Image (cartoon, coloured by chain):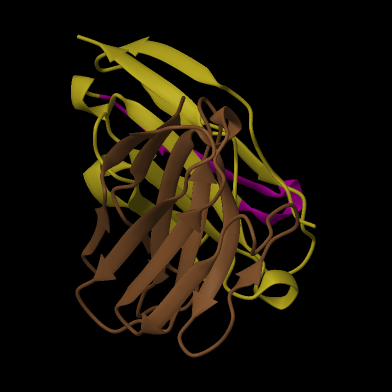
Amino acid sequence: SAVISQKPSRDICQRGTSLTIQCQVDSQVTMMFWYRQQPGQSLTLIATANQGSEATYESGFVIDKFPISRPNLTFSTLTVSNMSPEDSSIYLCSVLGSLPYEQYFGPGTRLTVT
Amino acid sequence: AQSVSQHNHHVILSEAASLELGCNYSYGGTVNLFWYVQYPGQHLQLLLKYFSGDPLVKGIKGFEAEFIKSKFSFNLRKPSVQWSDTAEYFCAVNAPQAAGNKLTFGGGTRVLVKP
């Protein structure tokens, strides 16, 4: 399984600002995913990020709010823009493993917006 | 779109008790099924998975799950839990023909094992 790290591990941000979350993998992967886990809730997929192409966003998530970069096969960033308290969540990246459909998750970034 | 439901939000039990967590999904086509676990302060880990073949799959730490296609279920079991099994458990479904590599997660079940 891949080893995934995320930075920052947590942050407290003010309303109206933006935060960029980094996801680094120890091996090359084709697909990376970004999820949100709101307090007390399950994981919701924000978008799928493939290297060399635009991210594909799920219903309810837009690029202007959650721009994603995928510059190479081991790295991706998710930006949470113009934050509001409703954006307070854990943001997780995951990667598609060597077996089809199997995903491995990073430790998450706990974001609190005040 | 497929959906996944987990019957219990919270489960409290004593050590050595048996555990069964329910998971049902709504998609009628081919599915790949997963259970993930999140221990306190740790990241989400894959507990076990079903792709095809024997519907009874065994995972790490003594867990097993049974895929019952007719019931659209993939329940997780452990015969005798330990305090260290305290965690949140998530069922997830992949429907490759409908959603490619995407996973849909259930709401999660928080399990507390009392010593």
Note whether residue B29 is visible. yes
Out of A32 and A80, give the one closest to the viewer. Answer: A80
Residue at 46 percent of width and 24 percent of height: A114
Chain identifier for the yellow-coloured part of the image? B
Out of A26 and B106, give the one closest to the viewer. Answer: A26
Query: Where residue A83 sits: x, y (%)?
Result: 54, 40
Q: Is residue A23 left or right of residue B106?
A: left
Q: Colour of chain A?
A: brown
Query: Where residue A87 sits: x, y (%)?
Result: 55, 37
Query: Where residue A75 sits: x, y (%)?
Result: 32, 74
Query: Where residue A40 sits: x, y (%)?
Result: 52, 25
**Which of the 4 image quadrants contains residue A95?**
bottom left
Out of B60 and A81, give the one closest to the viewer. Answer: A81
Whether the magenta-drawn stretch holds residue B77 is answered as yes
Whether the magenta-drawn stretch holds residue A59 is answered as no
Q: Is residue A21 left or right of residue A36?
A: left
Residue at 29 percent of width and 24 percent of height: B86
Q: Is residue A89 left or right of residue A65?
A: left
**Which of the 4 image quadrants contains residue A3?**
bottom left
**Is A15 rendered above or below residue B50?**
above
Residue at 34 percent of width and 84 percent of height: A73
**Is A93 rendered above or below residue B26?**
below
Quadrant including the N terminus of chain A: bottom left
Note whether residue B52 is visible. no
Point out the stretch of residues depicted in magenta: B68-81
